[in-house]
Image (spheres, helix red, strand yellow):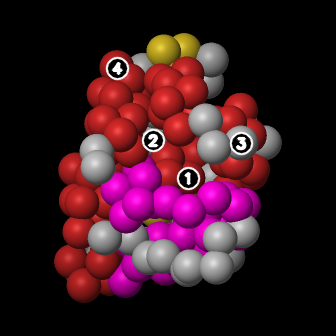
Amino acid sequence: MSNVILSTGAKGIALIKDFEGKELKKYQDVVGKWTIGYGHLILPSESFPAAISDKEAEALLRKDLATSEAGVNRWVNVMLTQNQFDALVSFTFNLGVGNLQTSTLLKLLNQGLMQEAADQFLRWNKAGGKEVSGLTRRRIAERNLFLQA
């Protein structure tokens, strides 16, 4: 783990909001999971019988970002630029800390193989075993952000 604890910057938040979209009423995502706000996965202990406000959507996003940020800060042991961190948080926000933790992307990153790690983003474009064009676009955007100086 690097000694510097990072938090998501403006580019990362914008990327996540752009790809997640904002839905103030609960809906089922592409694999059938109930979701609300900016891609917040509704937990069994949560209930959203009515629409939420913009403020509530933002609060859920911040809470979910904290989980993703903690995962990236915990499992990455090399120094990152803000753009690299933001790209990894978007990736983790979408796929979960467990997928980051076991990914070849993380293994290559922690070996200092930045280009090879960046190329791994593109492999994570499936949901339910099927390629999803929106995920392909997201992974390309994350990879591009990761590679920006």
Extreme right residue here? 102
Q: Is residue 70 left or right of residue 82?
A: right
- Determine whether label 1 and label 4 are within 8 Å by CB: no
Q: Nearer the viewer, mark 2 or mark 3?
A: 3
Provide the residue designation for mark 2. 29
Between the residue at mark 2 and the residue at mark 3, the CA separation in whole angstroms equals 34 Å
State whether residue 47 is above or below residue 40: below
Residue type of the residue flagged with mark 4: Ser
Q: Earlier in the sequence, mark 1 or mark 3?
A: 1
Query: Which comes before the other along the chain, label 1 or label 2?
Result: 2
In the drawing, what numbered circle is on residue 22? none
Q: Given this view, does label 4 or label 2 mark the residue nearer the observer?
A: 4
Q: Which residue is mark 4?
A: 133
Q: Identify the amino acid type marked 2.
A: Asp
Label 4: few (<14), some (14–19) or many (≥20) C-alpha neighbours in 10 Å = few
Q: CA distance from mark 1 to mark 4?
A: 18 Å
**Along the line of sight, the residue nearer the viewer: 114 or 17:** 114
Picture coordinates of residue 25, whole percent (x, y): 31, 62
The Cα atoms of the two marked residues, 4 and 3, are separated by 30 Å
- Frontmost residue, 32 versus 21: 21
Neighbourhood count class around disc 2 (C-alpha, 10 Å): few under 14, some 14–19, many 20 upward: few
* Highlighted magenta segment, given as a residue range: 59-87
Give the residue pinned by disc 3: 111
Sooner in the amino-acid sequence: mark 4 or mark 2:
2
Q: Which residue lies under the disc numbered 1? A: 92
Query: Residue 41 vs residue 38: left or right?
Result: right
Evaluate whether residue 65 shows in this view: yes
Q: Secondary structure at mark 3?
A: loop
CA–CA distance in space, label 1 to label 2: 17 Å
Q: Is residue 78 above or below residue 9?
A: above
